[in-house]
Image (cartoon, rainbow, N blue to C red):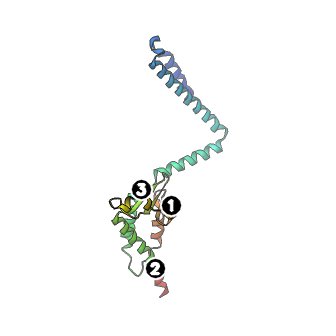
Amino acid sequence: MIIRTLSSKLALLKNKFTLPSRFQKGLLGKWTNYWILVGQDYKRSTIDLIKESRKKPLKTSIVITSLSGIIYSIKTNPNEIDFKSTVQLYLNESAMYGEKTRNKEVDNFYVQLIDSFNHGLVRRISFGVFSIIWIDNYSKEHGIYKSQCKYLRPRYLTFHTRIVDFGFLGRWWNIDRQYKIYDINEDEWNK
């Protein structure tokens, strides 16, 4: 209904506005006709889309839900600053635990991660919907040959061993999992 009223208003506007005959065959006339045809194509495709969505409401709801989920994932894709602030927050909170309570593996993981941050080795790859944090061999600022040679870059087959965290829906999943087990020291129970 809204589209019909809009199209009727555009038709009235088209009838009111006409180019003088000397401009109709020139560049301005062709340009005007092009944009009129583009508008008509969009109008037809929008009407067809509405008709199709009324015929198949289940398909329409699935498509809209999927697109909404993808858009939400893109909007909440965490970046490297989010990762650094999450690590800092968890380190500050974990400093409250005593050394006997801390999990040694998770503690070593955090120490290695902070060391990598200090040396500039932490990298982020964004895939739009999700992000990956990984550890590189050398800092970007190094001018040595090994850091710039394309043959000495990390291999694709062993790249999965360098991945530190996976970011999706506004959170970093590995860091969150590590923090949940940070205060569970298995050595404390074995003694």
Residue with the most extreme right position: 55
| Residue at figure coordinates x 43%, y 57% from the top left | 150
Is the C-beta separation of discs 3 and 1 under 8 Å? no
Relative to residue 108, is residue 4 drawn left or right?
Answer: right
Relative to residue 52, is residue 166 drawn left or right?
Answer: left
- Name the secondary structure under disc 3: loop
Residue pointed to by mark 1? 156
Is the C-beta separation of discs 3 and 2 under 8 Å? no
Q: Position of residue 139 (x, y in %)?
A: 36, 62
Gap between marks 2 and 1, in whole Å? 35 Å
2 vs 1, front mark: 1
Could you say which quadrant of the image residue 80 lies in?
bottom left
3 vs 2, front mark: 3
Gap between marks 3 and 1, in whole Å? 22 Å
Could you say which is closer to the camera, residue 152 or residue 40? 152
- For marks 2 and 1, the one nearer the N-term is 1
| Residue at figure coordinates x 41%, y 56% from the top left | 79
Is the C-beta separation of discs 2 and 1 under 8 Å? no
Q: Is residue 146 above or below residue 187?
A: above
| Residue at figure coordinates x 50%, y 21% from the top left | 33
Q: Is residue 69 above or below residue 144?
A: above
Q: Residue 185 has which mark? A: 2
Q: Residues within 10 Å of mark 1 (few under 14, many from 20)?
A: few
Could you say which quadrant of the image residue 103 lies in?
bottom left
| Residue at figure coordinates x 65%, y 45% from the top left | 58
Residue pointed to by mark 3? 79
Q: Position of residue 76 (x, y in %)?
A: 46, 53
- For marks 3 and 1, the one nearer the N-term is 3
